Each structure stands twice: as structure tokens, then as C-alpha cells.
Amino acid sequence: MYFCCKQNKNVIVNRNIILTIKLNTKQMELLGIVGPFQILIFLTIIFFTGVLPILALIDILKSDFAGNNKIMWVLIILFMNIIGSILYFLIGKNQKI
């Protein structure tokens, strides 16, 4: 379980820790190093794919539209998440009564 290394120095290191460090290093090589730029990209993707359509659907359901526009916008956002929500905030907000 324990072993000594470094010629005359009596350094005792746990093997499990070394194996864990090697495993994490290999995983990091496979996944790449995650820095602030990658985190920013990840958060932007989460915002556009998750938060923006939910905000658009909440706004649609709270508002009144003429005719079947409310149903149309809900279906557009459900089937085309990112594009539908962006189109709603650019075009659909002007169609409210």
C-alpha cells in the first residue's frame, strides 16, 4: 500500500492518490483543459437552449394575442427552441394586444 521513493529521502506516498492523480491527468488530456473561456461558452449555450425558451413561453402565456397567435408562438418555440425564442423576442412581442 505504501512505498518509498527518491533515493535517500524517506517519502511515503499512498498509491491510491498517485493512481487518482494519473487518472485525472488522463481524463484532462482527453477532455482538454477547461478554462474561463470554455465556461463562458458553456453558460451561453445553456442560456440560449434552456433559459431563453422558458422565458419566452412564460411571456407568451401571460400575454394576450389576436386570434391564434398565442398557439402559433407556443408551437414555434416548442419545435424550434433557440430560433423560435429569438424570433419571438424580435417579432412576437410587437404582436401583443
Image (cartoon, grey):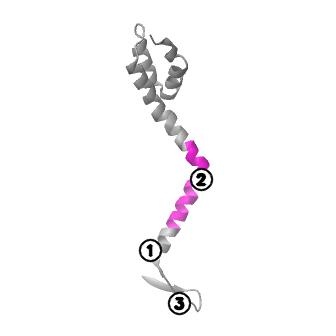
Callout 1 crowding tier (Cα within 10 Å): few <14, some 14–19, many ≥20? few
Q: Residue extending furthest top?
A: 67
- The type of residue carrying mark 2 is Gly
Determine whether the residue tagged by mark 2 lies in a helix, strand or loop.
loop
| Alpha carbons under labels 1 and 3: distance apart | 18 Å
Q: Name the residue carrying label 1.
A: 16
Residue 26, percent across and down?
54, 63
**Which one is earlier in the sequence, the residue at label 3 or at label 2?**
3
Residue 1, percent across and down?
42, 82
Determine whether the residue tagged by mark 3 lies in a helix, strand or loop.
loop
Q: Name the residue carrying label 3.
A: 10
Q: Residue at x 58, y 59 (%)?
A: 29
Q: Residue extending furthest right?
A: 37
Q: What is the chief secondary structure element of the magenta stretch?
A: helix
**Which one is earlier in the sequence, the residue at label 1 or at label 3?**
3
Residue stretch rendered in magenta on the structure: 22-41
